[in-house]
Image (cartoon, rainbow, N blue to C red):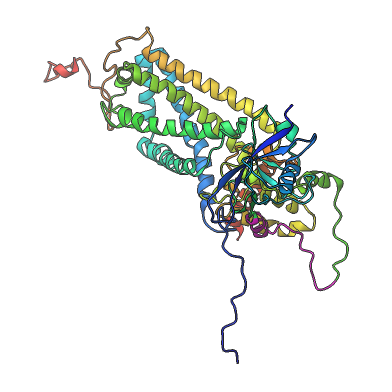
Amino acid sequence: MPSTIKVEIKRQATPDAASTTEKFEVPYRPNMNITSLLGEIALNPTTISGQATTPISYDSNCLEEICGSCAMLINGKARMACSALVDKLRTGDEPITLAPLSKFPVVRDLAVDRSVLFQNLKAVKAWVPIDGTYDLGAGPRQIPQIQEQRYPLSNCISCTICMEVCPQFNDSTNFVGAATIAQVKLFNMDPAGSVLKEERLRALAGDGGIQECGFAQNCVEACPKQLPLTEAISDMSRDVIVQGVKDLFTR
Amino acid sequence: MATTAPPAPSSAPPLRGVQPLRAGQGNSFLWRKLHSLSGIVPIGAFLIEHIVSNFETINGPLAYAQQVKFLNSLPLVRVLEWAFIFIPLGFHALYGVFIAFRGRANVNVYPWAGNWMYISQRITGLIAFAYIIQHVWRQRFSGVSLPEHPGAAFHKVQVELSNPWMLAIYVIAMVATTWHFAYGIWLFAAKWGITPGDKARKRFGYVCAAFGTALCIMGLVSIYGIVGPKYQNAPEDVMPEQPAGIVLPAPNTPPPNSTNPDPSVLQK
């Protein structure tokens, strides 16, 4: 077993700079993940040819697949760096390749700007409106059956992998993406959040909305938290259609 | 008094790349749903009718001619043809091409079953589009006009399919079109929220696959009915002309006391 790991990283110094590829060779330790590999490079930022360089920029926080910040292209596929284990990624002496997510503007190196997801969540009001000028008291009771349906959807970590792998999520459709649609279902099923249900459904019928889904189902395959994304899209599609028909005849 | 204008309220700088949802704006939802619905009704319904009608070719030229005559004698048939076939088909095709070229297929990176079906739906749609243009032009709008000459239908198709390249095109298009329709039904159920659950979608997938296969086999059998050995060299026309204002066929034998006892040569 080789005592070092080769890594090829697509780098970019600024949002407008041209991208370059740098190769590194880092000492192997058992049970490494991609974030610890990037940490190893930061300890000694020298390329394979001995040239001194800067440490790699990337987003990460929790290191246990719960914050959603370290999504990147690992060997070409969108994954969380923290849960991508080096021992499972290595195939012979082939280098591991790292690149930023391809559908989001690069900030620097592997760090990308994913604020489009935040904008989308705001556009569909993915929250429970409980703010008031006085104490509104206890919320309505949640029955366990609804809770059980909602819980898997609440696991979304906003990593944007579902959007990265979606063939319909691109700058031509400007599709909203599966994560936001799943959050609409989550908050529409909330006994207190459902007060905004109609507004959320109308928002999803806008340009770039739920209709752009092509049902390639990559989102549900790639989701690191196994959210039932296709089920949410199907359910919300029906609700948006019903809302549209209702609005047509009653508004 | 302030001498300079206050700074504009700090709004987020315009995003690069994929833009956020335009909540509640635009009509693309309506067009997209019309596209989806038009694929089932009326286009899908017509495809079933077309393949079932063509299945009459296995009963020979006269049976096929009678089927063509029956369809062309439906009331308001030209209105039906434009309102339920040509216009919806044209819309479905053009909007479908628009949809297909806005997607960024990535099956090379993520070779999953659903992703293969995603690209297959676009490829089969484009095959069907190219095929249908030539098919409608060559069989409906050029050559002998079948609404007035239903008896010529079998011969017209047989001549067309005597070219092995054209035969290959028909077979490929039959597979592509029925594939597109069968997966289209599945997609319709998934995207209109009829089959949201994983199990429901899987079960309905088998139903659509069986249905599509049956439709495809029927289509291929009717092609075999045309090119197979049983009805080789079919007569050019097996029925008298059927003009729009058709009345009883003129009698072949002169009525009693006719002043014109010798019938026209055309009636013999």
User: Of B254 and A43, which appears nearest the observer?
Assistant: A43
Vertical comparison of B130 with A208: above or below: above
Label count reads 0
User: What residue sits 64% from the left and 40% below the top?
Assistant: A48
List the single residue furthest toward the top: B229
Rendered location of residue A175, percent (x, y): 58, 49
List the single residue furthest toward the front: A50
User: What residue sits 35% from the left and 37% below the top?
Assistant: B78
Residue B41 appearing in the image: no
**Magenta stretch containing residue A119, yes or no?**
yes
Query: Which quarter of the rendering shows the C terminus of chain B?
Result: top left
User: What residue sits 77% from the left and 38% below the top?
Assistant: A32
User: Does residue B252 appear left or right of residue A236 in this picture?
Assistant: left
Rendered location of residue A177, percent (x, y): 63, 48
Residue A240 appearing in the image: yes
User: Of A60 and A250, which appears nearest the observer?
Assistant: A60
User: Does residue B253 appear left or right of residue A176 in this picture?
Assistant: left
Vertical comparison of A203 with A235: above or below: below
Rendered location of residue A207, percent (x, y): 55, 54
Q: Which stretch did the figure color magenta?
A: A115-134
User: Does residue A41 appear left or right of residue B66 in this picture?
Assistant: right
**Magenta stretch containing residue A118, yes or no?**
yes
User: What residue sits 32% from the left and 30% below the top?
Assistant: B140
User: Does residue B65 appear left or right of residue B236 in this picture?
Assistant: right
Query: Which quarter of the rendering shows the N terminus of chain B?
Result: bottom right
